[in-house]
Image (spheres, grey):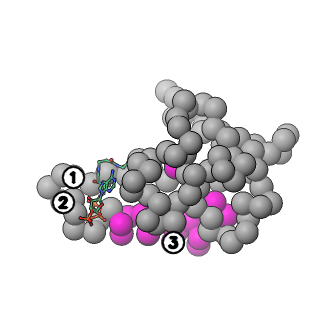
């Protein structure tokens, strides 16, 4: 939400791979495929709450630094991240990320 205006965005994660299948590249493929599909859908951003040691290698950055806010979950700055699918868009949009109610039932 940017002021009074709502913009639809996409949230990726949690991503999980069965322990017996980890470290074979499956997580990376899932994330990259997710980002590709978001691009095809015409999204500008992908947000997530996730491990700050894992997601930055895919290009995710701390979202609050770019003017995005998250109040529904009490999380630190480093775990709330954004990926810019359209270069330069973080300069033109700011506001609060609001998860839909289905995340809270
Ligand atoms: C994170 C996860 C999805 C990665 O899946 P994966 O299929 O093993 O991923 P990949 O094979 O593409 O990458 C594995 C690499 O990521 C690293 N990695 C895994 N979790 C990590 C973390 N929390 N922080 C930093 N690196 C991590 C592994 O050490 C491995 O490193 P290497 O390539 O140098 O050996 C998987 O470990 C998992 O399901 N974890 C439990 C759920 C979770 O924490 N999800 C992420 C938070 S939403």
Q: Is residue 43 visible?
A: no
Q: Is residue 28 above or below residue 94?
A: below
Q: Which residues are magenta?
A: 28-49
Where is mark 1, residue-wise? 18
Q: Is residue 53 left or right of residue 100?
A: left
Q: Is residue 41 left or right of residue 5?
A: left
Q: Is residue 104 above or below residue 98?
A: above
Picture quadrant of ligand 1: bottom left
Where is mark 2, residue-wise? 21
Q: Quadrant of the N terminus?
A: top right
Choose between 10 and 87: the one closer to the eye: 87
| Residue positioned most to the left | 20
| Residue positioned most to the right | 4
**Residue 11, how many percent across, how many down?**
55, 51
Q: Is residue 86 left or right of residue 6?
A: left
Specify which label sits upstream in the sequence, 2 or 3: 2
Asked whether mark 2 lies closer than 8 Å to ligand 1, one says: yes
Where is mark 3, residue-wise? 36
Magenta span includes 53: no
Residue located 22% across and 63% down the image: 23
Magenta span includes 42: yes
């Amino acid at each position: 939400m940017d002021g009074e205006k709502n913009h639809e965005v996409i949230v990726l994660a949690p991503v999980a791979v069965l322990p017996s299948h980890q470290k074979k590249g499956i997580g990376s493929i899932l994330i990259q495929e997710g980002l590709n599909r978001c691009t095809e859908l015409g999204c500008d951003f992908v947000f997530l709450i996730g491990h700050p040691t894992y997601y930055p290698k895919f290009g995710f950055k701390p979202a609050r630094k770019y003017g995005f806010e998250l109040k529904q979950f009490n999380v630190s700055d480093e775990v709330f991240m954004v990926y810019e699918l359209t270069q330069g868009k973080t300069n033109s949009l700011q506001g609060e990320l609001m998860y839909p109610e289905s995340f809270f039932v």
